[in-house]
Amino acid sequence: TELVEDTQAIARYGRNVTKMDAFGCTSRGQAHRAGLWLIKTELLETQTVDFSVGAEGLRHVPGDVIEICDDDYAGISTGGRVLAVNSQTRTLTLDREIMLSSSGTTLISLVDGSGNPVSVEVQSVTDGVKVKVSRIPDGVAEYSVWGLKLPTLRQRLFRCVSIRENDDGAYAITAVQHVPEKEAIVDNGAHFDGDQSGTVNGVTPPAVQHLTAEVTADSGEYQVLARWDTPKVVKGVSFLLRLTVTADDGSERLVSTARTAETTYRFRQLALGRYTLTVRAVNARGQQGDPASVSFRINAPAKPATIELTPGYFQITAVPRLAVYDPTVQFEFWFSEKRITNTAQVEKSARYLGTGSQWTVQGSRIKPGTDFWFYVRSVNLVGKSAFVEASGQPSNDGEGYLEIFRGLIDETLLGQALKERIDASALRTEVTQLEEDIRQRMDTDIAEVTRKIGKAENSLTQLVAKKNEDQTLAIAQVSQKVDRVSSEISQTVSQGQSENARQIAQVRQYVDKKGSEITSTTDKKLGDQAVTIQQIQRVQSDTRNELNAMYMLKVQKTKNGIPYVAGIGAGIEDVDGQTLSNILLQADRIAMITPENGNTTPLFVAQGNQLFMNDVFLKRLFAVSITSSGNPPTFSLTPDGRLTARNADISGAITANTGTLNNVTINENCVIRGKLSANQIEGDLVKTVGKAFPRDSRAPERWPSGTITVRVYDDQPFNRQIVIPAVAFSGARHERENSDTYSSCRLIVKKNGAEIYNRTAMDNTLVYSGVIDMPAGRGHMTLEFSVSAWWVNGWYPTASISDLLVVVMKKATAGITIS
């Protein structure tokens, strides 16, 4: 048992099993061919025809292959009878009007005197019925039959099955469709192109074009919008849709079918999976066109195709791009200061930024000249894609950074205070006014005290006079007490002065021994914040009896228990036997501003272990690497000696052992002492192109038929010549008993649409060759080479032509003479 099947037919029509006995087959190969012959017969030969003819039509027996011209099926007149024959003008008068095709060669089949069919070329048609042909076959009689062969219609061949005689003297013929390519298909696996139909009615609808499927989310589920169009408008056509899903094992399952007259259709409530949508056009008779398919997925989104990194000042902006835009997809952004070699560790090692269409990372930690890494993946309602890595650096434009620092410094209170000027005259006026106020207040106070003393003296005088006698004894007693107290006070003062002198002596002794220090401190608290300003002046001696001096100014703020310090210090000390002076600064940002001419741009700014300056003049520069600004940099010099420059003008000599040059122009002479190898060279050289002429495939001996077009572009600044080497073409002579016939081969050459050669070869061989000038600047040149051959007395033409070769070269006479 041998199994023979056609998978494409099974997919289209379903499985239809037929068993047959391979009688006479002696091998599996013969049995397989018998089964394949049966399948191809059922697929290709699907038409049967019945018609009746008179005795004149009995020119065949069952089994013969006949050609049928059916006007009703073709939709135009394709056959009839010849009413008149004019051999001198080669004109035939037909019984009905015909129409010629706008392109191609139209043939008409006639019956000669021997009863054999002969095909000749139709050259023109007058009044629809008068046909001028290339020649009149011998013996063509009036009222004989004719058949028309148009290049737009496929030849309808049938194999006669039976012939029956009717009672009226006519003969009924039954024939089945015959496909001459079937044997080549079965034996050699040849491809059969069945697009050309035997009718002009367009029975079979064309295949749809530009089929697309757009997936969108719908409330947690998914829907697909299918769109397509047709190459031409067909009346009454509809579209049959078939949606299948593919499992992991490769099997397909039908999901849905639909039929619509529109060119769009929406599928709803689809699950995750891989889908295939097939659409084919169906006409009103139920005939289906060729199917068109498109595949799509409802799964996690595709990963970003590219990530564009845009550098900024202390910032980098990442913008991912998909290969195909999908509005339902967003992107997750992860950031790392170090590269993560294993993307599976991104979520553990990198910092999650957020989800969006783009993201900007900024801050003082984004330092110029340092690589930073982004890890981005696509996300939608279904899931997430794999990570895509991208690295970049912020802008390295020093001038731009200085402008930014200028704005930042101007916004600080310190920067504003530094720009304020001291008004000495206002201070002097204020001091003078203060002195005057104090002087007036002292004069007033002294006058008041004097008045009060005088009043008190008068009162005491009166009191003493009145009671002098009564108080004499008491005054004496008071005087004694006063004297005693005065003595005690004097003694106490004397002892206090002695003690102070002793303590001062001790302080001076300590200062002379240990050093000198003056500290001024100002502080204030507000809630959990505390600010302290401290100024220290210190002179001291070390263990080697060396004096050191220093001055420090520190500003400290404590917030949430964390101290933040800024300060400046200047000092002189001895280090390793040498006196060294230092000025130290402590701050997150250090800037120097010269207010000359109102300029507020800093001379330099130091921040984050980096220094930004505008203009620098150096006698020497020692650097591990040098990189210019720009993205990408226009100039760089790496530690390994690699120099990269986008544009360099070198006036001196260049010595190189290896390297690569791109887009280089040599203005003057160049000497190459070694070997020169080149893949492509344009300019003053020869270019050639060749091609074989097309062939007509309607017979085993394919004859030349078709056109070759050569287009030479006007893309060179010098004159050129187009050389066509010899092209040989020939026909053939066919010997017959009564007369000889010929196969003709014609070659036509056109230059820019104008004919420059037209010759026909019969039983001889003709040769065409030429040289065509092509001046520079006059536009492109188009050459057309058309070859054709004629059928003779029903025989396929025997013609041949050699391949075409075209040579294009510069037109010059230097180094050559002709006489």
Image (spheres, rainbow, N blue to C red):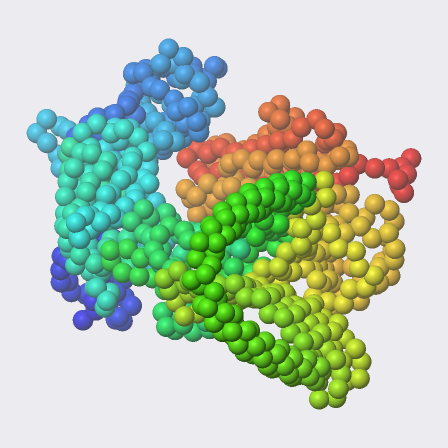
Quadrant location, the C terminus: top right
Residue sticking out furthest to the top:
127
- Residue 372 placement, left or right of 680: left
| Vertical order, 576 against 760 (above or below) | below
Residue 803 at least partly seen:
no
Along the horizontal axis of the image, is 55 left or right of 395? Answer: left
Q: Residue at x 61, y 35 (%)?
A: 711
Q: Residue furthest front?
A: 469
Question: Where is residue 368 drawn, in percent x and y?
Answer: 58, 59
In the depicted view, which residue is nearer to us: 506 or 6? Answer: 506
Which image quadrant is residue 346 in? bottom left
Residue 438 appears in the rendering: yes
Query: Relative to the observer, which residue lies in front, 726 or 606?
Result: 606
Q: Percent from the top left, x then y, of residue 271?
A: 17, 56
Residue 14 lies, with reference to residue 173, above or below; the image says below
**Outermost residue, left direction?**
167
Viewer-side residue, 625 vs 18: 625
Locate residue 358, reporting x and y percent: 41, 51
Percent x, y of residue 193: 34, 45
